[in-house]
Image (cartoon, grey):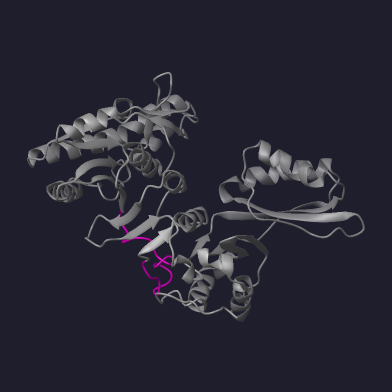
Amino acid sequence: MALIVQKYGGTSVGSMEKIRNVAVRIARTRTEGNKLVVVLSAMAGETDRLLGLAAEAAAKPIERELDVLLATGEQVSIALMTIVLNEMGVPAISLLAHQVKIQTDDKFCRARIKAIDPEAALRQLEDGKVVIVAGFQGVDEGGDITTLGRGGSDTTAVALAAALNADECEIYTDVDGVFTTDPNICPKARKLERISYDEMLEMSSQGAKVLQIRSVAFAKRYNVPLRVRSSFNDDPGTLVTKEEPGMESMLVTGIAYNRKEALLTIIGVPDKPSVASDVFQPISGADINVDMIIKNRSVEGFSDFSFTVPKLDEDRAFKILSKQAEAMQAVGVDRGPAVAKISIIGVGMKDHSGIASKTFKTLAGEGIGVMLVSTSEIKVSVLIEDKYAELAVRALHDAFDLDKECVTEEVF
């Protein structure tokens, strides 16, 4: 008998018909002899509806009360699922965060899980029940409801799987698994049978929307086998697991893209040892993440800094940087064109050279210029004009033969 944690997203429980379909899958998994904990998101569109109501109530709602409001979405979905399961003859019980004892810090709307006491869930499992848990929510030490931010139900599921020492955590969504790239823009994209935690972390952080990055980090930290599956078919999906022998035989595993970044440049900054700190400290102080950075070589005592920030923070960053440029007696600040970050990812890159060279050659062959570059042990990211994003993904997917099961030859 295995202990399995399943998580179903909003699209999977977006209507009563879909809830009944998921209930059939849950019943089948239990009939196979498994103990089962199920984490649900709010029904599709419900969180946005609640946010809309909050916006009507106040221009800037109190975050504590916003969490009280948003947590009701998951409460509705778990109650409905439990009612349906019991009507089918499957004993089930719904549990909210305070009942499962999912303890978080007190950062409303973006809380982080500190601990989970699995005793209540284990007790219900021993009584033969399917345990249906509200995703996305927790409670702080003062007993206040908190929420984990967008995609938080993934994190809830993986954290529960770790606390329960589950055999596997299955994340059900509207796709069949993790693909080599977005199949919506590259018809040759291939579903992966396995991917390492590190590769999935890079894919998620560089724009792939299949899994929330915090959930992957949890899975890696606690060695939770994580499987991404579709709730609309029986495909086995993709297993996210620790790096295993043979994974490095694939030089490149996938290509991710992010079209939600903006490029800013501060021009003609007087060069001195503290210049980088002077440029970026005000940006960091405003809680704006800086991603790719390049500093041009000092010419006659002046340098330029180019860097990317989330597009949602572009206006704020521009205002802060403009004020800082004036204080530093720089020439000014320039907004770049619309940009996209393309990332080539694979654990096989650790022991092979030539990935960056092949990337640049491929893009040049399509007439695509590279603005910025950043690398890690298993990733090469390039910043290009947004209008070339889809062409770049398709060209690189072809160049690295990602439609094939395994490519082991050198890239030169």
Quick one: which residue is furthest to the right in this view? 300
In the rendering, at what x and y percent does residue 362 appear? 59, 78
Q: In this view, does 205 lie to the left or right of 175?
A: right
Quick one: which residue is furthest to the top in this view? 142
In the rendering, at what x and y percent does residue 109 appear? 46, 33
The residue nearer to you, when weighing 62 against 35, is: 35
Q: Is residue 176 magenta?
A: yes
Q: Is residue 255 above or below residue 263?
A: below
* Quarter of the C terminus within the rendering: bottom right
Picture quadrant where residue 86 is located: top left
Residue displayed at 64% across by 42% down: 316
Magenta segment main secondary structure: loop
In the rendering, at what x and y percent does residue 394 appear? 48, 74
Q: In this view, does 86 lie above or below 16?
A: above
Q: Is residue 68 left or right of residue 11?
A: right
In the rendering, at what x and y percent does residue 319 appear? 70, 43
Does the image show residue 346? no
Q: What stretch is highlighted in magenta?
A: 173-191
Residue displayed at 33% across by 41% down: 161
Q: Does the magenta stretch include residue 28?
A: no
